[in-house]
Image: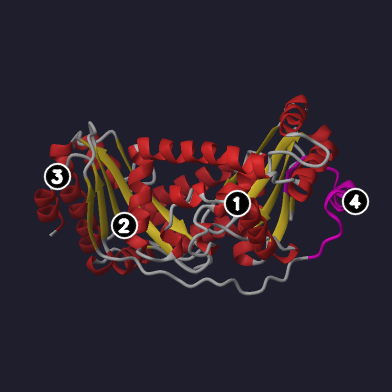
Amino acid sequence: MADRMPSAKSVTIGIWVNVGSRDEDTGEEGFSHFIEHMFFKGTKARSATQISREIDSLGGEMNAYTGRETTTFYVKVLDQHLGRALALLADVFHHSLFHAKDVEKEKQVVLEEVRMVQDDPEDLVQDLHTEQALKAHPLGRPILGKPTTIQSIRRQDLLRFIDRHYHPEETLIAVAGNFNVKELRPLLEGSFGSFTKPQRPPMNRWPSDVGNGLLVRHKRLQQAHLCLGFKGLRNDHKDRYGLYALNSLMGGSVSSRLFQEVREKRGLAYSIYSYAASFSDTGTFTIYAATRPKQAAQVVEVVGRELRRLHRHGIGRTEIERIKEQMKGSFMLNLESTPSRMTKVAKDELYHGRYLSLNEVMAGIDAVSGSQVSRLAHELFSAESHAVTALGPISVRELEAAID
């Protein structure tokens, strides 16, 4: 998958593997993320230090990230260094050694990353919330894994996981930026071998439901951190643009209803926002807020009132038109960077099986109506699928009363 940007001075290449934390078996929690780390610890041709020095010598950036459904390795460089960057990325992806001594050392690094999340209440409450909302479903697991599992990882465990999941038919390469179209394919084939459009077998995945209830984790903090969760939509759902509009309406921008009502009008929070997480077969919708512990119940009440107001009165024409313009502007501005364009073409292929043109996306946004957004609010924001997670010195009784 490739998207040429002639006006750019850079190019970004990404390797996307169709495996993430949801694909781990019991006892493998955190394997996908740990493997991502290990790919940069040395190959037959380059040590870890040489890998770092080589990408720095190109003035580029090389990194990776693990999601719940995919693992991505990417490099961004000036367009003149495309060939060298491809060779480096291919060496890391195909020839990493996974030495046992490096596995042992990396355990401590990953455990420090877990501790960093534990010390960041915004990250921690969202991990707790995902686990609570999705219950025992694999999507609810923390991507970083469990400390006990991390401590017991062995080199052969990781190699077996790679053998099981890192197949050519589960891997795609996405390129975005300034490149010569005639030269790109030979460069890719020279670094990765010949390739065809992947024909993916069905993954061992099943959709999740969003559970109901309240989880309170007491912790000595200056603030209470809250997540309210509801059902969402899968990535390729026909109403996905309506969901994006619903997110913008509720908490996706500084003009959103929750930002204006909770922060600007009442001064109850500095940080309040919403986001939709969509996957290949399911999705969630989450509202996050951080406030003083004594005001936690009040924030939940205000959020509940805004949801009920949307149910009763819907959304007016002026507001929906403003939201659509905001969505189009945000989408187009985001695509001015080569990493964002690389991500778009990869996700288009993964979730839609084809490239979605910018005109097609704009048309999808233009087609959103106020009645569609109102319908989605009724379908998704239900009391039966409504999970609340709180972290901090919070009164459970007051929070329960606010939810009821």
- For disc 4, the neighbor class at 10 Å (few under 14, some 14 to 19, many from 20) is few
Residue 249 location (% of width, % of height): 35, 51
Secondary structure of residue under mark 2: strand
Instruction: Decide which of tag 1 and tag 2 comes sooner along the chain.
Output: 1
Q: Magenta segment range?
A: 175-196
State yes or no: discs 1 and 2 in contact (Cβ < 8 Å): no
Instruction: Decide which of tag 3 and tag 1 comes sooner along the chain.
Output: 1
Residue 154: assigned label: 1
Which quarter of the rendering shows the N terminus? bottom right
Residue placed under numbered mark 3 in the picture: 298
The amino acid sitting under disc 2 is Gly
State yes or no: discs 4 and 1 in contact (Cβ < 8 Å): no
Answer left or right for 133 relative to 243: left
Residue placed under numbered mark 2 in the picture: 229
The answer to whether any part of residue 77 appears in the image is yes
Residue at x-position 90% and y-position 51% = 186
Please tell me which residue lies in front, 305 or 80: 80
Residue 383 location (% of width, % of height): 22, 66
Residue 60: assigned label: none
The answer to whether any part of residue 368 appears in the image is no
Q: Is residue 241 above or below residue 336?
A: below
The amino acid sitting under disc 3 is Gln
Residue at x-position 83% and y-position 38% = 45
Which quarter of the rendering shows the C terminus? bottom left
Q: Is residue 181 above or below residue 352?
A: above
Residue 117 placement: quadrant: top left
Instruction: Decide which of tag 4 and tag 1 comes sooner along the chain.
Output: 1
Residue placed under numbered mark 4 in the picture: 186
Q: CA distance from mark 1 to mark 2?
A: 36 Å
